[in-house]
Amino acid sequence: MSLPIDAVLASIRSELGRHNCVVLQAEPGAGKTTGVPPALLPDLPDGTYMVVLEPRRLAARLAAERVAAALHEPVGRRCGYQVRHESRRGPETRILFATEGILLRRLVGDATLQGTWLVALDEFHERHLSTDVCLALLRRLQLGRRPDLRLLVMSATLDTARVADYLGGCPVLSVPGRPFPLQIHHLPAPSARPLEEQVAAAVQSTTGGHVLAFLPGAAEIRKSQQACAGLGLEVRMLHGDLPLSEQEAAVSLATRRRLVLATNVAETSVTVPGVTNVIDSGLARIMRYSVWSGLPRLEVDRISQAAATQRAGRAARTAPGQVWRLYTQADLAIRPAFETPEVRRADLAEILLLLLATDSTDLDWFEPPSDEQMAAAQDLLSWLGAVDADGVTELGRRLLAWPVHPRLGRVIFAADDLGVGGDGRLAAALLSGRDLSTGVDLMERLQHPSPEVLRLARTLGRGESGPHHAERLQRAMLAGFPDRVGYRPRPRDATVLLAGGGSADLGGDMAWFVALDVEERRDRGRHARTMIRLASAIEPDWLLEAYLERVTEVRGLAFQQDRVALRDVLQWGALPLEDRTRPAPPGPERAALLAEAAWRGALHQHPTVEAWLARWRFTAGPEVTDTLFQDALREVCDDRSTLGEVREAIEHGALTEALARRLDPGRRLDRAAPATVHLPRRPRVPVHYERDRAPWLASRLQDFFGLRQGPRVGDVPLVLHLLAPNGRAVQVTDDLAGFWQRTYPQVRQELRRRYPRHAWPENPENEQPPATSERGS
């Protein structure tokens, strides 16, 4: 059966004969992955072979199997594959499908790629970090020691102009997809229904062939599997957390109508036979990397327009197809054209170590990573002992030889040194593989490893097994994750603190630990929540033993829990390893810190202080500045050690006395704005001073008997609140004589009626106030 790619195979061969770079844009279903490599076999010089880079292991294996079948040969003869922990190739192999990581590791030992005639970068639009690094290293090799090396960049959705320009203005070939019609359905309006219900409804609308549904992750796939269980289709799952055997089963030929619930692993390269219906949630779970925290962040986000095109293309590869997009056409229009490349959001430690080891840090990137990412990667490699001031260390070069992240290689080496190499390899396999067991404690997970983890551990070589020694393995885990130390400050509290700053959620009861698997998730409201999914317990003393140069000592005074303390703390990042805190001795520094805390706590705004300030403002005295206020507050704190003692002193006038000593040494305030005045039978009646109001006092009307004029403050008559026996004002006035003459006769009649037991004389200015007992009755 002919494929659209067949029409341009001759042009591809011709262009690669004249140019060392070609860009091929082939729409979904054109057949580029399995059609181009065998067509180039006749052009291979003797003793050479081609490498076809695939973004995923499953894609590399399936492509090799299909090309080998087309050549009527077993896999491993002329067409083979090599992926992490697995290889099927032989001396006759001329086409090698591989993942990018395989090629990167080969470049460390064979920087010129001797024997390789062509490297094809398939599905380049996915822009994995290793894809970008491969392209940059290969282009550097072309422009240097291997001008004969051919590069073929292939993709269905590709910004061909940018890539061709990067490759020196190379030729661009385009191939249309199959001419099968494709009908695309969009939601008329956004739906509030759960995603799994939307998927089930869309499945019921499909007809004809198999159905491929794209969902963001394994959790959504499981929910959709339950929702679609009774719809009469064979339901299969396809995502990266599944064993390879189950992934292969999902893409195998089916005898009955099938529904495949997949993540974006099925967008490209991996073909599910017989699919004519695609359901696209429009979502993907994307791993990003937080430079500030050093933690990976897993976000559910909307896919790009290019990814939507890729997904839709799965429906019309062999027959007319239909696509149900669970989002609106307007939503699609505002999405970005392409995904953010991984080089802008990934952990670069492994890549940076490779570049440093090959003197390739001056790469001409297709799109360079940020300076912050590179700095974070450099710092991690320093933590691991892989680099120092002179460059890559001997340990760093050993780490490069292992097919795992430098963290896990460091764990293996430390485990070997501690006599638990077998356990170290098992732990590294669990962390680099697909472990579906539960539990947050690594030691518990290692008790029942999955067959996949055991298989991966065997590929890492044999290590000394012997009895299981948890402490030794935990020390090895610290060697690989020294920057991920955390601490639980309160027993049985799920909130833990991280050495890099911030907090996270962790189950279990580990007090000190290293976080091995951490995600920072964001919900639809964009609220971040850091979750530790796997950890290994440690002892804080181990940090002092192994990383003493990284431990910092913090010594000095600090305000803590209502008092100033003398701190002598050993810290690991933001975490206290050892805290010898005790009460601070008296002195200017203690007083200053206590005064700062009192000021922050607004103790200087106590009512006694506010009343004094009101009197001071009444006299039009100099402004009380914050500096003067704080100086007086420090004086109050001189002989105190806690905020409680300072608060009590302020209540008893210590702060106003300190202010008076600075502003009013002659005690003018007591004369110009006295706090109290004298009435005939009340020697100390409080005077109230308020901004923009005349000073006033309140007392019972009978207290003013015998007075012809009311009291004054300087030249200002006080406003008198004349109270009835029930405490309510019967008159407010600053003219007591006028009140006696004009208002009192009428008030007297009402008061005599309501309070007959009290004396209400006709001429109160000539009477003495009644005794205290009568006034209080």
Image: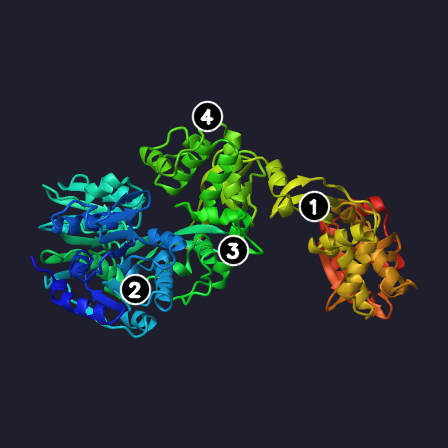
> Which label sits in the foreground, 2 or 4?
2
Amino acid, disc 1: Gln
Q: Are marks 4 and 1 in contact (CB under 8 Å)?
A: no
Q: What residue is rendered at 14% in x and 49% in y?
A: 273
Amino acid, disc 3: Gln
Amino acid, disc 2: Leu
Element under disc 4? loop
Q: In the rendered structure, which disc, 2 or 4, sits on the residue that comes first in sequence?
A: 2
Mark 2, residues whose alpha carbon is within 10 Å: few (<14), some, or many (≥20)?
many
Q: In the rendered structure, which disc, 2 or 3, sits on the residue that comes first in sequence?
A: 2
Q: What residue is rendered at 54% in x and 44% in y?
A: 482
Q: Is residue 570 left or right of residue 40?
A: right
Mark number displayed over residue 560: 1
User: In what quadrant of the picture does the N terminus appear?
Assistant: bottom left
Mark number displayed over residue 466: 4
Q: Position of residue 509 (x, y in %)?
A: 52, 33
- Is residue 534 among the parts visible in the rendering? yes
Give the alpha-carbon distance from disc 3 to disc 4, as whole Å. Answer: 36 Å
> Which label sits in the foreground, 3 or 4?
4
